[in-house]
Structures are given as C-alpha cells and as structure tokens.
Amino acid sequence: MPYVRTVLGLLSGLAACGAVAFLGYCVYFDRKRRGDHAFKLRLREKRRAQQQKAEGRGLWDPAKIEKLQQLFLQEVRMGELWLSRGKNVNILFNALLVCGQPQELLKVFRHTLPPKVFEMLLRKIPLICQQFEADMNEQEYLEDDPD
C-alpha cells in the first residue's frame, strides 16, 4: 500500500510540475510575442485591412451608391407621376428615405409640391422614419439568423 501512495504522490507532483512548466512556457512566449515590434506591425496591418474591408461593405460602396441613386430617381419619378394623376404621394417618402441629402430634397419639395401635399409629407416623416428603423432592425435580425 505505501508503494501505491508513493507512486500516486510522484505522479501528481509530476503533473503539477508539468502544468506549471506549460503555463510558464505560455507566459514567456506571449510576452516575447507581444514585445516583438514586427508582431505589432503585423497586428496593426491586419486590423487596418479588416477595418477597410468592413468600410468597403458599408454604404460607401460605389455599386450600392449607384443603386441608391437609381432607386431615388425612380421613386421621385413615380411620386411625380402619382401626384400628376392626383393620387397619394406616399412614394415620395421612399425617395426621401434613400436620398443622401434629405434636407435639400425637402427644400426642393417645398418649392415644387402643393402646400397641402408638402404639409402632409412633413407630418408623416416621423412615422416613416420609425417604420424604416423597424424594417432595418428586422433585416439585421434576418441576416444574423442562421436558419
């Protein structure tokens, strides 16, 4: 029996020494890696590349800008057509949403739309913004959903 206890004691001591040695090895090489100037440069370059890649997928992608411009012009044309027919101008809200400079577009609408229609447009802007935010949140949820 004493022989078994001695062997188990030695094995547990060796395991503890091995764990301490492994942790020491990890700490030593992590400090060496973090202190290395070349590592820091590689890390910065990697982060810059990731940031540029993320920005490239953002709103400023030229293909997306062109599509937004086409959508904007289409929505304005449709709004003008509906307005000339005396119908509802809800389509102008879509043009306002995709416009890069909504304040400028509102100035143009103020001068070109009948006052009654322009006032209706101003009253509905907060509702349209809330709906747009809800749609965007739903789209983000669907993109994040793995199913």
Image: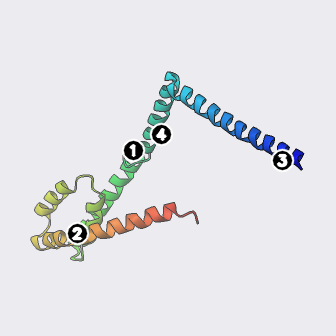
Labels 4, 2: front one = 4
Tag 4 near tag 2, CB within 8 Å: no
Labels 3, 1: front one = 3
Labels 4, 3: front one = 3
Please state which amino acid type lies under the numbered disc 1: Pro
Tag 3 near tag 1, CB within 8 Å: no
Which residue lies at the image location 37% right of the left edge and 49% below the top edge? 59
Disc 3 crowd, CA 10 A, few/some/many (<14, 14-19, 20+): few
Tag 4 near tag 1, CB within 8 Å: no
Tag 1 near tag 2, CB within 8 Å: no
Q: Which of pointers 4 and 1 lies earlier in the amino acid sequence?
A: 4
Labels 3, 2: front one = 3
Secondary structure under tag 2 reads helix
Q: Which residue is mark 3?
A: 5
Labels 1, 2: front one = 2
Q: Which residue is mark 2?
A: 126
Disc 2 crowd, CA 10 A, few/some/many (<14, 14-19, 20+): few
Q: Which of pointers 3 and 2 lies earlier in the amino acid sequence?
A: 3
- Where residue 47 is drawn, which disc sits there? none
Task: Residue 79 in the image: state x and y as whole percent.
Answer: 26, 67
Please state which amino acid type lies under the numbered disc 2: Pro
Secondary structure under tag 3 reads helix
Q: Which residue is mark 4?
A: 50
- Where residue 62 is drawn, which disc sits there? 1
Please state which amino acid type lies under the numbered disc 3: Arg
Task: Between residue 118 and residue 48, name the one nearer to us.
Answer: 48
Which residue lies at the image location 64% right of the left edge and 31% below the top edge? 25
| Left or right of residue 8: residue 86 | left
Task: Between residue 137 and residue 119, name the one nearer to us.
Answer: 137
| Left or right of residue 147: residue 18 | right
Screen quadrant of the C terminus? bottom right
